[in-house]
């Protein structure tokens, strides 16, 4: 569901043109929201993941106005960065209730969250340096700024309520 919402957010929020947002025979911009949702729901999980990745990459390239000669290299580096961030985040299990932890367990979990947060920051710095070899520093800064805005938008769209006793390490924008 989160992937579907994110794909729809990208389609709506960033107005990708039909040429960039098209996968095979679909013209996403001309489809109504119900049609988009139906097509996305009929895709396999792998196809959905690829579609989302394509939308995200197109949005980033358009937003940053990346030169055509740099698009392939930058896209590869950006996807590598995101995969590393995802791998680091997976090292922290956010599904716990802090109130049920002993003091020792809570301290260990807190320390683990700091360590994961530091690894995320270190990875971000590493890739910021690599990206600056392809695009100007201003565009790298704009990329990280837009990531923060997208994360905030996704958090706004998450359903609130229910029994959500999870704690997640917060990544700096």
Image (cartoon, rainbow, N blue to C red):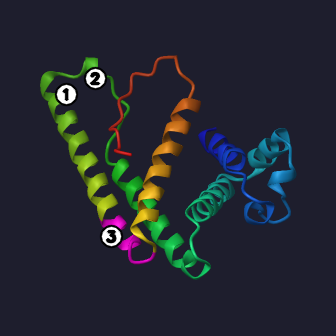
Marked residue nearer the N-terminal end (2 or 3): 2
Find the distance from the CA under tag 2 to the CA under tag 3.
Answer: 36 Å
* Residue 36 among magenta residues: no
Query: Can you identify the residue that label 1 sits on?
Result: 106
Query: Can you identify the residue that label 2 sits on?
Result: 98
Do labels 2 and 1 touch, CB within 8 Å?
A: yes
Q: Secondary structure at mark 3?
A: helix
Query: Can you identify the residue that label 3 sits on?
Result: 129
Place of residue 151 in the rendered image (x, y in percent of width and height, measured from the top left): 49, 42
Q: Secondary structure at mark 1?
A: helix
Residue 16 bears which disc, if any? none
Do labels 1 and 3 touch, CB within 8 Å?
A: no
Place of residue 66 in the rendered image (x, y in percent of width and height, measured from the top left): 56, 71
Q: Which residues are magenta?
A: 126-134
Mark 2 is surrounded, within 10 Å at the Cα level, by few (under 14), some (14 to 19) or many (20 or more) other residues, namely some
Marked residue nearer the N-terminal end (1 or 3): 1
Camera-nearest label, 1 or 3: 3
What residue appears at the point 36 percent right and 35 percent down from the top-left corner? Answer: 168
Q: Nearer the viewer, residue 60 or 138?
A: 138
On-image quarter of the N terminus: top right
* Residue 132 among magenta residues: yes
Query: Is 128 placed left or right of 58 in the picture?
Result: left
Marked residue nearer the N-terminal end (2 or 1): 2
């Amino acid at each position: 569901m989160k992937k579907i919402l994110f794909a729809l957010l990208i389609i709506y929020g960033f107005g990708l043109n039909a040429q960039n947002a098209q996968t095979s025979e679909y013209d996403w911009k001309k489809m109504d929201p119900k049609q988009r949702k139906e097509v996305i729901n009929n895709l396999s999980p792998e196809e959905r993941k690829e579609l989302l990745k394509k939308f995200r990459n197109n949005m980033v390239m358009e937003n940053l106005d990346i030169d055509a000669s740099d698009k392939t290299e930058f896209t590869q580096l950006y996807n590598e960065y995101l995969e590393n961030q995802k791998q680091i985040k997976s090292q922290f299990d956010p599904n716990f209730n802090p109130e049920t932890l002993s003091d020792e367990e809570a301290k260990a979990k807190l320390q683990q969250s700091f360590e994961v947060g530091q690894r995320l920051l270190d990875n971000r710095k590493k890739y910021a340096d690599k990206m600056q070899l392809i695009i100007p520093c201003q565009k790298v800064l704009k990329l990280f700024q837009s990531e923060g805005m997208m994360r905030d938008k996704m958090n706004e769209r998450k359903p609130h309520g229910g029994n959500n006793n999870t704690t997640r390490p917060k990544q700096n924008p």
